[in-house]
Image (tube, rainbow, N blue to C red):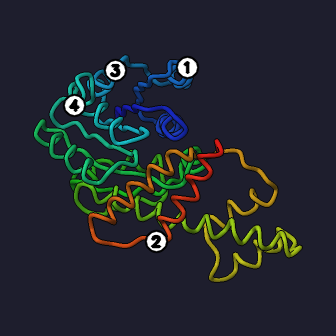
Amino acid sequence: MRVGVVGLGIMGAPMARNLLRAGHTVTVHSRTRERVDALVAAGAVAADSAAAVAAASDAVITMLPDTLDVEAVLAGPAGVLAGAAPGLLAIDMSTIAPDAARALAAGAEAGGVTLLDAPVSGGEQGAVAGTLSIMVGGDADGFARAQPIFAALGTRVTYMGGPGQGQMTKLVNQVVGAATLAAVAEGVVLAARAGLEPAAVVQALAGGAATSWMLVEQAPRMQRRDFAPGFMVRLQQKDLRLALAAAAALGVALPTTALVHQLFAAVEAHGG
């Protein structure tokens, strides 16, 4: 397929590379020229706007930091919808507010464009390896059309229902992931103070009810004090704010999530 990618950050750039490896024709656009040039060197084609990406593509992926960014890139004057021909498949893989995803899908549909919300989990490592978990909301026929694209990016692709439901699923993922990360961090500190052998702790816990991706992947990094970032705190905070707002609208209490949100606020306050 002719696939466009707008947004070539930590996640978008490796995703574009995996699309190239899968044999798709890839057109890219980013505000950072160096990122575009690196993809062009790998075989992609550069475009000077999101609208130009859409004009050259059968499907366009957006991978951007926040709701306002997605709204501007999809629906702005030089955005994807401005350059789209009827029948274009747009796939937003950012994490944004579910209500915004629904509104964007309705606006796209009015112009003959199918918009899926398809946020991902797995981080930079999953983006590079092509092993992302992809949670998809939107039109079922659009989901079927997107399968060759998703196959190049992830190993678990789940259709969650209509517009916005992919985003809502991602917020559930962030609630569970962030709370689990906090629990793993506390367990690692307790084990260290008790003099337990780090690798043995992970091995023991990984065989029981306490196992998780956060334990297996992140505990060893904590134990060796490898704090090289794989995701920005400000974006994790954005995700948790979205989750707390969605919960408030639904009348759901998330006390642990609220606490973790404040713990990350402390990290932010110290410049982490």
**Which residue position is annotated with label 1?**
34
**Which residue position is annotated with label 3?**
49
Instruction: Classify mark 3: helix, strand or loop.
Output: loop
Q: Disc number at residue 255?
A: 2
Q: CA distance from mark 1 to mark 4?
A: 25 Å
Q: Residue at x 24, y 44 (%)?
A: 115
**Residue type at mark 2?**
Pro
**Quadrant where the image shows the C terminus:** top right
**Can you say whether 43 is above or below 129 in the image?**
above
Q: Residue at x 28, y 36 (%)?
A: 71
Of tags 3 and 2, the one toward the viewer is 2
Q: CA distance from mark 3 to mark 4?
A: 12 Å
| Residue 213, image x, y percentages | 61, 65
Question: In this view, which residue lies farthest toward the bottom?
Answer: 208
Q: CA distance from mark 2 to mark 4?
A: 39 Å
Work out whether mark 3 precedes mark 4 in sequence or the reverse, and give the earlier one. 3
Q: Residue at x 50, y 70 (%)?
A: 256
Instruction: Classify mark 2: helix, strand or loop.
Output: helix
Could you say which quadrant of the image residue 228 lies in? top right
**Which residue position is annotated with label 4?**
81
| Residue 177, image x, y percentages | 53, 64
